[in-house]
Amino acid sequence: MNRTNLTVITPDGIGDPWSEAWAYRELLYFTVWRDLRVRYRHIGLGAAWAVVQPFTMMIVLSLVLGLMAGVPADGAPYPVFTFAGLVPWIYFASAMTHGASSLVSIQDFLATVYFPRLIVPLAAVLVPLVDAALAFAVLTLMMAWYGIAPGPALIALPVFVLLAVVFAASATTWLSALNVKYRDVRFVVPFLLQFGLFATPVAYPSSLVPEPWRGLYALNPMVTVVDGFRWTLISTPAPTGVMLLASTCTVVVTLALGLRYFRRMERVFADVL
Amino acid sequence: MDGFWGAVRSATGAPAPEGAQTLWALRDVSLEVRNGEVLGVIGRNGAGKSTLLKVLSRITIPTEGRVEIRGRVGSLLDLGAGFHPNLTGRDNVMLNGAILGMTRDEILRRFDAIVDFAEVAGAIDTPVKYYSSGMYVQLAFSVSAYLESEILVVDEVLAAADARFQKKCLARIEEMAQAGRAVLFASHDMAAVQCLCTSALWLDRGQVVHHGDSRSVVGRYLTAEGRDLYSAQSPGDGPVVLEAQLVCQDGAAAVRPRVTEPIVVRMHVRLPAGAAGTRLGIAVRSADGVPVFSSNLEDAGLSLPSGPVTLRAEVEIPADTLLVGEYHVATCLSNGADLLDSHEPGLAFSTEPGATLLYHRWAGRKGLVQVPCRWTVERAP
């Protein structure tokens, strides 16, 4: 009874989204934990899927592009090279797929209970991190197999992880809200991801892209993320400052627009769903 | 919705076109609910009851106006509100606690009380999608009733629970109000609103009709909503009372029947094929919703034939039964287990004093009915 915190509801919405999401962090942990449980409970192979998917893709890419087409790999063994790109890419693809449908898939919930809606896409972005961690463990095993040790650049790895997570969070915040109103998003996301796989240096090195075009190329933040992963882990050339700048710009703009749209749509989620 | 251009407008943030018709679900509704108060929200379907509760629960954001809330709001707006079908009862309790902003320890302290009250101890580790709707609402209610919130908002969901559990819920709501929590409770059950609520809010088409003491608000609501002629608005395929009317013995409409004359309820009932065993009954309530008596066809040893057929039925409330005052009579059809058709609050009528001298001795009497009791007096030996 001593909690007399005042909540004011006005047409402008309720308070600041970030501080509110922070106040509900317990719910965020719970949502992430719940998603993981629901996800793994009814899946036969369980956590193994997190490894099987990137691993089979790595084998196919190594055979078709590495062996048959002879795509260069910046001097690294092609399987390790492509796997180091697949780990962040599959994380991003999975975050986008789950994130875009995250609000729509719990519509009954949104219509009956209040909590900061931002938690939903945020949780959707955090859950695939667990899969990514498993795939990352396999990557370290592969590096050991090929006898590759990371250099001092390894300390920069968290920067690229953060870049990937923030970009995924910004994009899913926007897409999940858009999906509430336009269910077409469900079809657009797989389409975008197919394009993205080619617009990101997962199967080929970004050094194949002519130097003057790299800044434009890196407007896709995943370019910098993948290059950053390879640089810090298998010592390929580092992403340039221009690339880092271009990618950061995209992330900031996506975050601002996504959050703005989400906040506007948040008011009517329960009515539209 | 509003088609392609509407979609483009909203995607670009342009305002809606002028002159578009606006339907206000709620307008000019101002009220204050204090700690320990139980507010009953009543009104017809579509009056704005659920919208009000949704605004207070922060599900729907108002277009204008302001709400100030001190404390956390626990809401039970829908059957299984806040429940994730794939999670077990246990996990759902934890989830709902987290939604209220409670920590894990706080939830665990109340866990046993919740399961105990909900009577689902045997099924607490089963995913809730396997629960019956009764179990669902039992767990949902006890979660919102035992988790720490200063304000409880309950929409018409208790109807899914059985009568025994409903009573238990009403008792718990009363207990919570006594502990200083504020409760908002929307219901069509006028007797419950009167027993439980300290005040009531009557909404109609989004506006407040009356707000005040629950007894008087409910009384006015029932009087206003009742009519002396009823006809079903959109009868479905099932058994239905198409029309009901109050008449005097001579067949004239009885808006103000005298207590000294019999009052007849005349009904037109339509039964579809295969509706064998349908029961027809009436229930008489006082103006403030207290049940006075009920009667059905079987009391007289009669039964309805199997359809398809349209029937005319009449039931006579004997003379010298009711007192002077306002009453409602509702009709209902059931098959013993389920209510098939009902018409609430029913036909309204107010009884007038009779012409006989005898009656005047009854005037101003307390109670709901006159009972011809037998008295004897003799000199004690």
Image (spheres, rainbow, N blue to C red):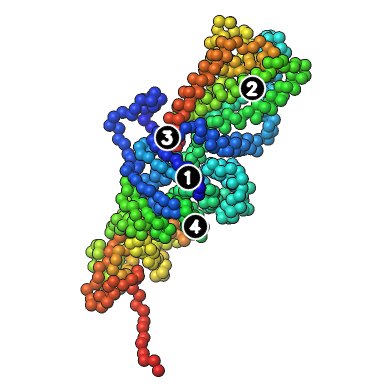
Write down the residue under mark 3: A13
Determine the CA span between mark 1 and mark 3. Answer: 20 Å
Q: Position of residue B380 (x, y in %)?
A: 39, 92
Q: Earlier in the sequence, mark 1 or mark 3?
A: 1
Write down the residue under mark 1: A4
Q: Which mark is residue B175?
A: 4
Q: Secondary structure at mark 3?
A: loop
Instruction: Tell me, yes or no, whether the two marked residues, 1 and 2, touch with CB atoms within 8 Å.
Output: no
Q: Position of residue A29 (x, y in %)?
A: 60, 36
Q: Secondary structure at mark 1?
A: loop
Q: Earlier in the sequence, mark 1 or mark 2?
A: 1
* Residue type marked 2: Pro
Toward the left, the furthest residue is B355
Q: Is residue A156 above or below residue B346?
A: above
**Quick one: A196 or A252, which is closer to the camera?**
A252
Q: Chain of mark 2?
A: A
Q: Chain of mark 3?
A: A
